[in-house]
Amino acid sequence: MKKIIYLVTILLGGMLGQGAFAADCVQGEATRIWIAPQTIKPGVPVRVMAVSTAGPITEMLLTDPQGTTTALMATLGLDGIPWWSASTIDPLADNGHYRVEARTNSDSSACRELYLGATDREKPVWDQAHEAFFAAWIEHLFDGPIDQDLSFPSLEPVLRDPERNFLHNSLGMQEDKNLPATPDCADFPYYLRSYFAWKNGLPFSYRFCNRGSATKPPTCDAAVVNTDFVRRQAPASAFRAVSARLMDAVQSGNGRTGLTSQETDFYPVPLRREVLWPGTIFADPYGHVLVLAKWVDQGSDGPGILFAVDAQPDNSIARKRFWEGTFLFAQVAGAGPGFKAFRPLGGNNRLLGNSELPNYSLEQAELTPEEFYARMYGLMNPDGLDAKQAYEAALTALVEQLETRVKSVDNGEAYFRKNGAPIAMPQGAAIFETVGPWEDYSTPSRDMRLIIAMNVLADFPQKVRNYPELFQLATEEAPQAGREIEQLHARLTAERTIRYTRSNGEGWELSVAEVLARKSAFEMGYNPNDCVEIRWGAAPGSEEYASCRRHAPAAQTKQMQAVRDWFREARRPAR
């Protein structure tokens, strides 16, 4: 369900009496109201967020010291779980108590008093209320219309936007003003978790892990438990120091740890919607990590959607839809892939073992890729998939990947305009995992995922034929439905377009059909030393290619030819 904005005023002056509040104005068992800044100060607006694990919050009411009750203008997260509602209140008067109440269909679910000096520093424990708040904060942070191309050059503009970041300057020290926030793929979930811990006075943990091997998942050292933010409002300098150490420590191996291991930062969860909250990660077997951000309910006008957010090596951030082309799932000996949650810290900052975890599950270890995707689409679309709607959603997801690649290639071009010198290319499988400019501006992992995505879209008509039950089709209906999807594929891929910038600064438009026809070019299009035209598969001698002025060194081209089968077969090599 989309956001709902509303404004209603209910005048109850005199009914409660000036300054008189009900004695039962308390937080609910399953609903809690949070405030920012955490200490209410004169002249400063107050942001409030109610978060519930029991049901949707349908309205937020504010009662002032005179007893007048107003329904707040609020942004609602109604697709849960958890459900939330966020609003901003004008600065409070110098005297008297206010009351904010969260309601669900006219029933009160939580209440708290607001007054100057009121504070929101709770006990430093990752309890259910904090986990739900973390999930709601993530969803609010990356929320937006479902048809919006939601992307950012880094995490910095997201955290510095008070309309997105409920915790913006919540410590009251202007701490977000110049805060650096440039995590890459593996750092991204840790940065979000540690930032939330900093703002809320919570501990957090991380481990030093290796990268594993072709036959063994990564293993990790004992956890580093950080308590620098507990029972104090730490300045931005303290968070910068901690986050620098954190991002130097973690890498892609942290997310790919074995599903049965106890010495991990993340643990596998069951494939149930009430468990897959925003903030849960998806770790693919090859090292990429996404952070779940929002569920969108299935409706009569479109299929259900699961959104996630990821960071790229160039630090850009983008929202992605769940589908086979983005969420790569495979059972390999060298990784424990799938959906995972942060391992919580219990009392005395002790990390819980697998047997103590609330939702530990090895369900994903037993699933084939086909079963995994069928299970997830079932969660997203409990009423079944319409084949045409499902195809159009897959096409939209591919276009989003292509538009993200446009930005990534542009970032590489910007690097060359500034620096000019060729980027060194690592040897063998290291092209996928390294450090420095190659890691930042090459796209081998992203292009392999793009090739997989192209295959998924091209194979969609056959998927309809092979799995008619997934689309609520009878077996005898599947052949005709497959032919209709083929026709839809031909028409829509010719209509949908992307636009990239050539070396001469001019734009060039490509239809999705043209991109699909160039799939083989993407097997060698990941090298930032090549001109942008080569990276988008322009044919030598064509008008499009004429503006190309830069080529990768001959030795690099030879090396790319030697490993081209990895991309042709969409087969990530063993580390």
Image (cartoon, helix red, strand yellow):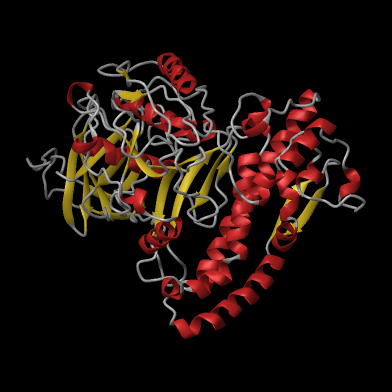
Across and down, in percent, residue 144 comes to 48, 50
181 or 386: which is nearer to us?
A: 386
Can the viewer see residue 158 in this picture? yes
Across and down, in percent, residue 22 comes to 9, 43
307 or 77: which is nearer to us?
A: 307
322 or 449: which is nearer to us?
A: 449
The residue sitting at 77% across, 25% down in the picture is 418
* In this picture, residue 395 sits left or right of residue 112: right
**Which image quadrant is residue 227 in?**
top left
* In this picture, residue 224 sits left or right of residue 504: left
447 or 495: which is nearer to us?
A: 447
Tell me the quadrant of the picture where the C terminus can be found. top right
The residue sitting at 59% across, 55% down in the picture is 453
Across and down, in percent, residue 256 comes to 43, 36
Q: Is residue 330 above or below residue 550?
A: below
> Hey, which residue is sitting farthest bottom in the picture?
476
Across and down, in percent, residue 208 comes to 41, 22
Q: Is residue 528 above or below residue 374?
A: above
